[in-house]
Amino acid sequence: MKRQAAATLLFLLLPGCWTLDHANLRETSAKYDLELSESEVSEKDVVALGSIQVAKGGFYLFGYFPIIGIGLHETIDRLAAEAKRMGADGVCDIRYNYSPAHPLKFLVFPAPDWSAEIQVFGMAYKWRTHPRPPRPGRGGAN
């Protein structure tokens, strides 16, 4: 009986450990013709246009079953679209923040909070010189 209770408790407390998502920055970069990077760029080469933050919220029934799911790839796609709208050549210093749904998360007890959220942040920039430096793997300036 104690083992079953311990296993049930473990099952309820660890769903965030089972989360895995994938986003391919190269695909999104090619789709929007933008440089997307998790690293910084040299200030002497670019002009910062501003910070971009994109968030997507979702709802998971009992903290497990997606009613309104969230995805890293879709959120990065929205970040790239916003950067393109700003006239950026790229987004650098991309960071992620994920808050998973959990069955034991409460707004105010006993009202459960089974929401999840993903946030993606980055700095939009334009190259100082045009044409911009060649992109790796493309063999020339765009």
Image (tube, rainbow, N blue to C red):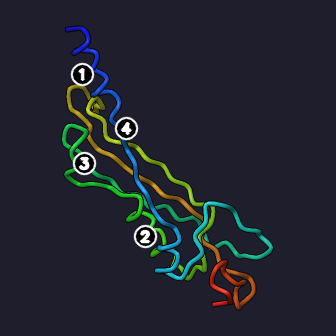
Numbered circle sitting on residue 16: 4
Residue position for label 3: 59
Residues at circles 2 and 4 in contact by the CB criterion of under 8 Å? no
Q: Using the rendered view, name the quadrant where residue 130 is placed.
A: bottom right
Tell which circle, 4 or 3, labels the residue nearer the N-terminal end: 4
**Number of the front mark, 2 or 4:** 4
Which residue is painted at 51% across and 79% down in the image?
A: 30
**Number of the front mark, 3 or 1:** 1
Tell which circle, 3 or 2, labels the residue nearer the N-terminal end: 3
**For residue 79, side relative to residue 16 (left or right):** right
Tell which circle, 4 or 1, labels the residue nearer the N-terminal end: 1
Numbered circle sitting on residue 85: none
Give the distance between the C-alpha atoms of the residues marked 3 and 2, in whole angstroms.
20 Å
Residue position for label 2: 77
Give the x, y percent position of residue 116: 33, 46
Element marked by disc 1: helix
Which residue is painted at 23% across and 45% down in the image?
A: 60
**For residue 135, side relative to residue 54 (left or right):** right
Residues at circles 3 and 2 in contact by the CB criterion of under 8 Å? no
Tell which circle, 3 or 1, labels the residue nearer the N-terminal end: 1
Tell which circle, 2 or 4, labels the residue nearer the N-terminal end: 4
* Label 1: few (<14), some (14–19) or many (≥20) C-alpha neighbours in 10 Å: few
Compared with residue 135, is residue 118 higher up or lower down, i.e. above or below?
above
Give the distance between the C-alpha atoms of the residues marked 4 and 3, in whole angstroms.
14 Å
* Label 3: few (<14), some (14–19) or many (≥20) C-alpha neighbours in 10 Å: many
* Label 2: few (<14), some (14–19) or many (≥20) C-alpha neighbours in 10 Å: many
Type of amino acid under label 1: Thr
Give the distance between the C-alpha atoms of the residues marked 4 and 1, in whole angstroms.
15 Å
Element marked by disc 3: strand
Which residue is painted at 31% across and 23% down in the image?
A: 10
